[in-house]
């Protein structure tokens, strides 16, 4: 989940809450997915 306020990405969705961790793995995963999606 991309956070437009910070430019970071949340760590993921848990069963009852959003993982608010905004580490580098989340950002890299988001950027990789975005690059793939832009092809289509």
Image (tube, helix red, strand yellow):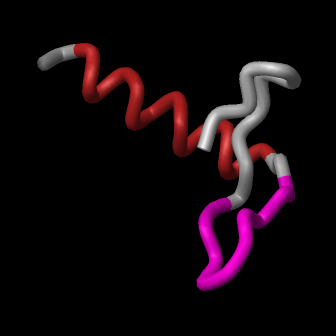
Magenta span: 12-21
User: Which percent across, then down, holds residue 12?
Assistant: 63, 62
Q: Residue 14 in magenta?
A: yes
Q: Residue furthest front?
A: 16
Foreground residue, 27 or 6? 6
Q: Quadrant of residue 17?
A: bottom right
Q: Is residue 11 above or below residue 16?
A: above
Q: Residue at point 67% right, 81% down? A: 16
Magenta stretch mostly in which secondary structure? Answer: loop
Q: Residue at point 85% right, 57% down? A: 21
| Number of marks in picture | 0
User: Which percent across, then down, holds residue 9?
Assistant: 71, 40
Q: Is residue 34 above or below residue 13?
A: above
Q: Quadrant of residue 2?
A: top right
40 left or right of 19 in image: left
5 left or right of 13 in image: right
14 left or right of 24 in image: left
User: Which percent across, then down, holds residue 32?
Assistant: 44, 34
Quadrant of the drawing holding the C terminus: top left
User: Which percent across, then down, holds residue 34?
Assistant: 40, 26
Foreground residue, 3 or 31? 3
Quadrant of the drawing holding the N terminus: top right
4 left or right of 13 in image: right
Q: Residue furthest bottom?
A: 15
Q: Residue at point 73% right, 49% down? A: 10
Q: Residue 16 in magenta?
A: yes
Q: Residue at point 60% right, 84% down? A: 15
């Amino acid at each position: 989940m991309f956070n437009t306020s910070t430019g970071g990405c949340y760590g993921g969705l848990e069963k009852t809450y959003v993982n608010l961790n905004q580490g580098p793995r989340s950002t890299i995963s988001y950027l990789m997915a975005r690059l793939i999606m832009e092809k289509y």
